[in-house]
Amino acid sequence: MNKTEVLARLKSEKVIALIRADGPDSLLDCARALSAGGLNCIELTMTTPGALELCAKVSKELPQVLLGLGTVLDADTARKGIAAGAKFIVTPCVRPEVIKACKEAGVAVLGGSLTPTEVYTSWELGVDVIKIFPAEYFGPAYIKSIKAPFPKIELMPTGGVTPETVGEFLKNGAFATAAGSALVNPTALKNKDWAAITKRAQEFVTAAAAVK
């Protein structure tokens, strides 16, 4: 799958599930639970111990999942993630060396920004989609405000995305959205309550699908 295909799939699925955990045990099952609920775009954060090894395992065992590696702060980690099977790389802030490494590898990069200056700087550096983070402080209206002067820049809000807000973010011009604890509840993950995670995924899918 090339970069264009990856970006098209992210846009069509509308919701990326962020998985953070204290360890790798059960994360494969969590990915299966999300997939069962209709969410097949997953970002595994580097704050999870053993993230690179798990990235390789998910890529091998769950080929239907479009897996990305998140919280990537340096070029070496980006390259290792790509080698492990990550189809896209996500940063929480403006990291020129990460953007450069992804461009050289021909892999989609979603770069974190918040202010208009950061957004445009990231875009000039070659980010494919701007991750607006943290989005909960300004809400869906902020996406519309940023799109006004930068209509060609694709934005993905992260933080504050719930089944109740995902539709508003998309209606205000978001390319796609990303959800962490509001989707993968830490308690459900710890208790291995896969049914609860699948149900929550279905709620996100239904809410996003309602936006035409």
Image (cartoon, rainbow, N blue to C red):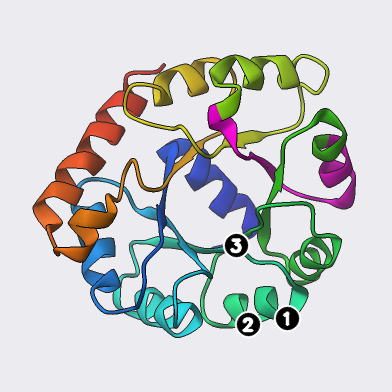
- Residue beneath label 3, please? 71
The residues tagged by marks 3 and 2 sit, at their Cα atoms, a distance apart of 13 Å
Name the residue type under label 3.
Answer: Thr
Name the residue type under label 1.
Answer: Asp
Image location of residue 182, percent across then percent down: 34, 40
Point 77% across, 66% down: residue:
98
As helix, strand or loop, the secondary structure at mark 2 comes to helix
The residues colored magenta run 120-136
- Residue beneath label 1, please? 76
The residues tagged by marks 2 and 1 sit, at their Cα atoms, a distance apart of 6 Å
Image location of residue 79, percent across then percent down: 68, 79
Q: Nearer the viewer, mark 3 or mark 1?
A: 3
As helix, strand or loop, the secondary structure at mark 3 comes to loop
Reply above or below: 137 against 82.
Answer: above
Circles 3 and 1, Cβ within 8 Å, touching? The answer is no
- Residue beneath label 2, please? 80
Circles 2 and 1, Cβ within 8 Å, touching? The answer is yes
Quadrant for residue 62, please give it.
bottom left
Quadrant for residue 81, please give it.
bottom right
